[in-house]
């Protein structure tokens, strides 16, 4: 009996020493020899935005496979569907009358090009306030050959907090009242057409407009959200709040602003779309998996730095650390770099559909998406036994990182938002590494300012250390994790328990 106790004690001591050695080496390497800046520069600055269906998305996959190969890590790209192929070209917008000014703006994703790439020279007009849909139809012929502004012009480009910090009490109240009334008036202007945003754009296009101009302000200094175009034949452009307001006021005051617009893009037909994977094969339990997860794609008005190059390079750095200091894991370690997350988690949903042999044998998945900040929240994702293993894994993380993190058990299952939800819906343990926002939703999420300089590398470094340790602990854990679901909380509106999120099928042919 004493021999058995001694043997168990020796095994525990060895495992503790092995873990401590791993943590120390990973922390030192990640701190003193981080590859994050280099990876981010190559991905964000050199390759740039990674819109699904663009050559840059394919280029990014090829780059990641090559990079993993340099580190001795097996990797591959896997086709899961098709998408509308499109490539951004030059956008240039100038005000030429009543004065000359180069304007800040860009074409939306999948926007048609100007004819043969030649500039449009046209007057800009504003969608009017019409009495009803019949009046709108009567007005439509007047758009022929014009550039039509179809968004509200903001009464101020100052964020609300600026007024809260500096305005008088009465001034703040007046600003909020004026802002609410302006938004209500514009909603009425749109409502009277009886068309939604997509059909409004198509109606104006069909009536012979030269192009459509919008502004989608993100409520911060100089920042807009830039998504996809609804038009199929004429360009759709987003002007900055400041320049959109300038053109809008000139048009409304009867000064007939004339713009010169070049909007170049290429239609590339239907192209394959890929997820990218890297793998370190397990030695004892190769058919059980611990996964890292981050979406690879982005919108394309900027470099896609915090959405989600930060998650991408963090996971790549984590794999580099694991390969260097844990080259023979107990369970197979797999990282998924997903495509078309931005259009509805399509890459990860396709993976869940195509690879039940992995999903059904998943020890845990750790997903990171929401910006450049340090991880501060990890929940149990609605799994009843998450508290039995997550705290044990987190206990190995250095205090300086672990003490920043709040945990909640059993937590709630994610129904969307990022790729961990695809796994949770299938009943697999998909955990979100929730990070501090650093004004993410106003300034970088889907905006024209999501650029390399917004990355806070010290925060991302900590996240790579955290992820490497969590993967190590999950892989080494002698026990298989439980996927038992906790009872869903009662919905106060219905008085009935909520329902676990249902799997959603991937869109495998998109953008057409």
Image (cartoon, helix red, strand yellow):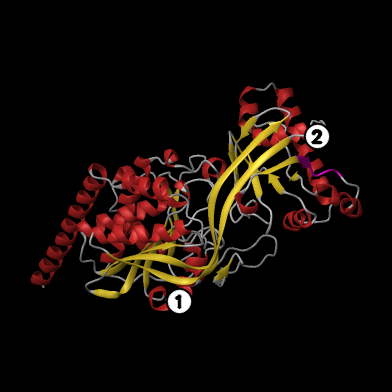
**Residue 362 screen position, x and y as percent:** 38, 71
Magenta stretch, residue numbers: 124-129
Residue at 35% across / 55% down in the picture? 315
Location of residue 155 (image quadrant):
top right
Dot 1 crowding, Cα within 10 Å, few <14, some 14–19, many 20+: few
Asked if residue 192 shows in the view, the reply is no
- Name the disc covering residue 159, or none: none
Total label count? 2
Q: Quadrant of the C terminus?
A: bottom right
Residue at 91% across / 54% down in the picture? 134
* Mark sitting earlier along the chain (2/1): 2
In the shown orientation, is residue 349 left or right of residue 482?
right
**Which mark is in front, 2 or 1?**
2
Vertical placement of residue 46 versus 324, above or below: above
Q: Quadrant of the N terminus?
A: bottom left
Name the residue nearer the viewer: 70 or 323: 70
Residue at 33% across / 43% down in the picture? 37
Residue at 45% across / 39% down in the picture? 454
Location of residue 93 (image quadrant):
top right
**Residue 501 screen position, x and y as percent:** 56, 68
Name the residue nearer the viewer: 338 or 395: 338
Whole-number angstrom distance, CA of label 2 to CA of label 1: 55 Å
Secondary structure at badge 2 equals helix
- Which residue is tagged 1? 354
Name the residue nearer the viewer: 292 or 471: 292
- Which residue is tagged 2? 252
């Amino acid at each position: 009996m004493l021999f058995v106790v001694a043997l168990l004690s020796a095994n525990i001591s060895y495992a503790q020493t092995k873990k401590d050695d791993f943590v120390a080496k990973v922390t030192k390497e990640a701190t003193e020899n981080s590859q994050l800046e280099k990876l981010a520069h190559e991905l964000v600055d050199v390759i740039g935005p990674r819109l699904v269906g663009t050559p840059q998305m394919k280029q990014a996959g090829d780059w990641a496979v090559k990079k993993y190969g340099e580190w001795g890590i097996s990797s591959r790209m896997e086709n899961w569907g098709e998408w509308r192929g499109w490539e951004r070209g030059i956008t240039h917008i100038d005000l030429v009358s009543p004065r000359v000014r180069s304007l800040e703006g860009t074409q939306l994703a999948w926007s048609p090009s100007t004819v043969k790439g030649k500039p449009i020279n046209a007057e800009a007009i504003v969608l009017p306030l019409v009495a009803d849909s019949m009046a709108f139809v009567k007005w439509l012929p007047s758009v022929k050959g014009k550039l039509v502004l179809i968004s509200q012009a903001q009464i101020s480009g100052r964020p609300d907090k600026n007024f809260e910090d500096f305005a008088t009490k009465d001034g703040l109240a007046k600003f909020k009242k004026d802002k609410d009334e302006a938004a209500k008036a514009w909603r009425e202007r749109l409502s009277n057409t009886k068309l939604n945003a997509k059909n409004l754009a198509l109606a104006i296009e069909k009536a012979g407009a030269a192009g459509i101009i919008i502004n989608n302000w993100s409520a911060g200094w100089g920042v807009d959200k830039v998504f996809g175009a609804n038009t199929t034949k004429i360009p759709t452009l987003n002007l900055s709040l400041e320049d959109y307001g300038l053109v809008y006021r000139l048009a409304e005051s009867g000064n007939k602003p004339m713009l010169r617009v070049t909007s170049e893009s290429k239609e590339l037909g239907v192209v394959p779309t890929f997820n990218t994977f890297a793998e370190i094969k397990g030695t004892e339990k190769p058919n059980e998996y611990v996964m890292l997860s981050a979406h690879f794609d982005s919108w394309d008005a900027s470099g896609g730095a915090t959405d989600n190059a930060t998650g991408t390079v963090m996971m790549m750095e984590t794999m580099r650390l694991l390969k260097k200091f844990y080259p023979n894991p107990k369970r197979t370690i797999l990282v998924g770099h997903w495509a078309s997350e931005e259009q509805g988690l399509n890459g990860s949903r396709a993976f869940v559909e195509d690879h039940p042999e992995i999903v059904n044998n998943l020890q845990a998945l750790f997903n990171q998406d929401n910006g450049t900040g340090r991880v501060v929240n990890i929940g149990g994702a609605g799994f009843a036994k998450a508290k039995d293993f997550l705290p044990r894994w987190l206990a190995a993380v250095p205090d300086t990182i672990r003490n920043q993190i709040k945990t909640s058990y059993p937590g709630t299952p994610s129904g969307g938002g990022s790729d961990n939800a695809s796994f949770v819906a299938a009943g697999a343990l998909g955990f979100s590494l929730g990070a501090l926002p650093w004004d993410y939703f106003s300034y970088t999420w889907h905006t024209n300012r999501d650029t390399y300089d917004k990355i806070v590398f010290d925060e991302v470094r900590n996240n790579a250390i955290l992820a490497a340790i969590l993967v190590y602990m999950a892989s080494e854990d002698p026990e298989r994790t439980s996927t038992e679901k906790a009872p869903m909380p009662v919905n106060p509106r219905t008085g009935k328990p909520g329902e676990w999120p249902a799997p959603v099928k991937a869109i495998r042919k998109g953008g057409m």
